[in-house]
Image (cartoon, rainbow, N blue to C red):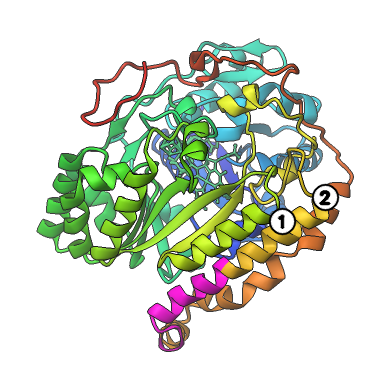
Amino acid sequence: MHSNPKSCRVLLVHPSALMYSEVYLRLDPLGLELVAASCRAAGYQVRLLDLQASAHKDYFRMIADWRPNAVGFSLNYLANVPEVIDLVKETRRKLPASFLFVGGHSASFTAHDILQHAAGTLGCVVKGEGEGIAPRLLDAAMDDRSRIHKLPGVVTLDGEGPHPEMVHSLDDLNPARDLLAKRRKYFIGVLDPAASIEFTRGCPWDCVFCSAWTFYGRSYRKRSPEVAAEDLASIREPGVFIVDDVAFIQAEHGFAIGREIEKRGIKKEYYLETRGDVLLRNPEVFRFWKKLGLAYMFLGLEAIDEEGLKRHRKRVTLDKNWEALELARKMDITVAINIIADPGWDERRFEIVREWAASVPHIVHLTVNTPYPGTETWLTESRQITSRDYRLFDVQHAVLPTALPLQEFYRQLVMTQQVLNRKHLGWHALFDATSLAARFLLRGQTNFVKMLWKFDKVYNAQRQAAEHGRLVKYPMSLPKVPAQTKVDPATLFIHPQQLSKPIAGVAVRN
Ligand code: B12
Ligand code: SF4
């Protein structure tokens, strides 16, 4: 068909935002920007469309006008599966000859189901990292589609290729941020506008509810400090979201990037996510980054009792977490914390969390314990999953049996989130929301200001309960019952395990 990539048009699409996350943030799809960069480097004409910031009608207008030869969809979030399948089917009708493919985090763990749902309309699902394989896949698909399932990580209805391959080096590519329109739509809290950046990839811990580590086979890779700083210098937005799962596990790497930032005189405000024990072990690097502009830090505490920490296999004690929170407060870094609410909670348990949240000076978020494909919990959770609707797997719905009647569970959840949000608004007060809002509006930035009023529109107990009654067009496959008691994590890995050197202070099993 198209032997010359230059005459070949490739559209890459990120699905819509889950409305619950949109209250606090909207971020550019970094993974897709990287895939776009590698396809462009291979000579393809590439466009990027993010449905978090554009509407479906913009997508259909674009495919009608531009008529891409290939359309790739990013599927990091399980809750987006039905939307992407519907887009694939509609695109197949409108562009019968186009090559349609799907990749990303959740797609990697549910590849066969996605192909089944798409009922022959989808060319393939790509498992694992996309930068290396995407141009090879396009080359093959533009030539002879019947052989693409021989490629690493590629799954079709005809079969599956060998294990996906990891990119040679994280330094080889910079994300194609220039391809993304409406860049002023991206923000996190008062960092408005903000852009995403990656310094490291993977996580050496192994929490049971998380698939960040199973995706990358427990590997942990770093970008070189010079490349990371150059990438940062090219970012126009004043706010920066560091997407690393656990920032600054290796203090020296954090220092080295920081020194490169100083050398270049880069002035930005940063948001990052890390663990309490990492902060305690490497306080100096966080202090240094505070000077560089570190404004917010997210600590995934997950539980406020020892028993909960053990259940999630956080490999950290409660005392260490409290100590970390206190240290962050002393450093004058605004801290957001996540707590996982279990569907088994009763009124008293929600009340304890509300009381606790009111007593700490930090921003507290509450998400619902949700077993995801690719996690250990998916296989070991012995309670039966109560829904086969992908859309409910967004950590704001209960997909496990609730101890309280479902309506009451949501009433308690939303009430608790309201209490926490009032504190969250205290966060705005901290930064003097009124004058800040005025400054943003003067610059034409409205994301932060809109967020101040969004909460009540988005969180609604009755609606959340009613969403359990929606028609399920694409029923999910559920884990086997009875549940496994012990899991070999290697069976969950998307990329085969890479035995990287042990990291000082990170004591996890091998
Ligand atoms: C940054 C991040 C976010 C950002 C999203 C930014 C964005 N718009 O994409 C924010 C903060 C908004 C976010 C929110 C949420 N997140 Co989040 N997030 C992450 C995180 C930490 C890193 C993602 C990232 O940017 N990685 C770096 C880039 C380079 O990698 P990547 O996106 O995976 O892309 C690579 C491959 O996946 C692949 N690929 C991706 N797209 C495509 C497309 C094609 C065609 C191809 C071929 C390949 C391909 O190639 C890319 C390059 O190698 C991951 C954990 C992780 N380590 O992956 C969790 C993660 C993806 N999030 C998760 C969850 C649960 C959520 C929330 C539902 C809950 C929450 N925590 O608030 C919300 C909902 C978001 C929504 N849909 O609105 C889960 C996913 C669970 C699931 N199976 O659905 C993860 C895996 C974390 C976990 N604990 O397990 N998240
Ligand atoms: S430390 Fe964070 S990213 Fe790593 S496995 Fe645990 S929850 Fe996932």
Q: Main structural element of the magenta stretch: helix, strand or loop?
A: helix
Q: Which x, y percent locates residue 349?
A: 63, 52
Residue under label 2: 405
Q: Please provide the residue range marked out in magenta.
A: 420-435
- Residue toward you, 36 or 493: 493
| Residue 383 drawn above or below residue 288 | above
Circle 2: residue type: Pro
| Residue 40 drawn above or below residue 339 | above
Q: Which x, y percent locates residue 362?
A: 42, 64
The structure residue drawn at horizontal position 79% and vertical position 38%, both measured from the top left corner, is 89
Residue under label 1: 56
- Residue toward you, 213 or 153: 213
Q: Which x, y percent locates residue 461?
A: 76, 61
Q: Residue 190: which disc?
A: none
| Residue 5 drawn above or below residue 31 | above
Q: Is residue 429 magenta?
A: yes
Q: Is residue 339 magenta?
A: no
Q: Which x, y percent locates residue 327?
A: 26, 57
- Residue toward you, 277 or 160: 277
The structure residue drawn at horizontal position 46% and vertical position 84%, both measured from the top left corner, is 437
Tally the numbered discs.
Answer: 2
Please identify, in this view, whether the residue under mark 2 or under mark 1 is nearer the observer.
2
Q: Residues within 10 Å of mark 2 (few under 14, many from 20)?
A: few
Q: Residues within 10 Å of mark 1 (few under 14, many from 20)?
A: some
Horizontal side of 290 relative to 121 (left or right) equals left
Horizontal side of 302 relative to 377 (left or right) equals left
